[in-house]
Image (cartoon, rainbow, N blue to C red):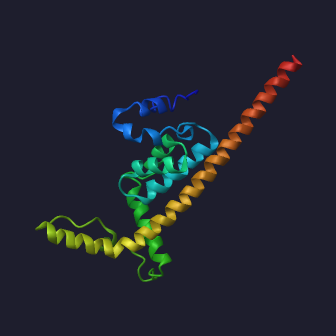
Amino acid sequence: MRRSRFFKHMPTSQSIQENRYLKPLRRYLHHHYLWQFNRRGVAGGMAVGLFFGILSPIAQILLGAIGSVIFRVNLPVAAFATLVTNPFTVPPLYYAAYRLGKWILGEDSAADDGFDPNAVGAMPELKGDVSSWWHTALEWVQGVGPQLMLGLLVFAIVSALLGYVLVSVIWQLQARYRWKQRVRRIQQSLED
């Protein structure tokens, strides 16, 4: 298999299957679609990675890898696409998801157009004993949780669909361009 310069440092199927820590998962990691860079695998990997990268606040790469095994799409692309959420993108993404969730649930009013740091702000700090922190954290999650999760679900689905379509379109355009270049080279060689 020919590997591009960008992907030459990625682990291969063989190196992952020979890893002693991944030995129990070896039977799930053997499918060739997990490692081939074709249109279906890459576009599907992008969709799976974007979906779990946006939807899950923790274990995104693990969930992306599991999703790629289930849907038999490119695993490295799925793992890489989960990195769409990072410390720079999470705050605006979560705030926009919270606002979208409030709008979908019909809780968004014209009077509430400002940012409320108490409603969406950072999770409560640990002050006092742990039991009071858990109680405060649970209240915080109950206050913003439904709106935030609904907004994240919508963003995850839309971004996964857009990612799949965008990669497929770019892949096809690139294939057409290469084909035209090949035809042009053949025509030039025949003319000479």
**Which residue is at the far top?**
192
How far across and how far down the image is residue 62, in percent? 40, 48
Q: Is residue 45 left or right of residue 114?
A: right
Q: Nearer the viewer, residue 165 or 73?
A: 73
- Between 188 and 18, the one lying in front of the other is 18
Residue in the picture at 51% in, 52% down: 48
Would residue 115 be seen by someone viewing this image from the given angle? no
Residue at figure coordinates x 33%, y 36% from the top left? 21
The quarter of the displayed image where residue 175 is located: top right
Q: Is residue 60 left or right of residue 176?
A: left
Of the 4 image quadrants, the one containing the N terminus is top right
Q: Would you say residue 8 is visible in this rendering? A: yes
Q: Residue 115 appears at what percent x and percent y? A: 37, 72
Q: Quadrant of residue 150?
A: bottom left
**Extreme-right residue of the structure:** 191
- Image coords of residue 6 (percent x, y): 51, 32
Dividing the picture into quarters, in which one does residue 184 lie? top right
Residue displayed at 44% across by 76% down: 102
The number of discs equals: 0
Q: Position of residue 165 (x, y in %)?
A: 63, 52
Quadrant for the C terminus, please. Answer: top right
Left or right relative to 18: residue 47: right
Q: What residue is at 23 percent from the left and 67 percent from the top?
A: 124
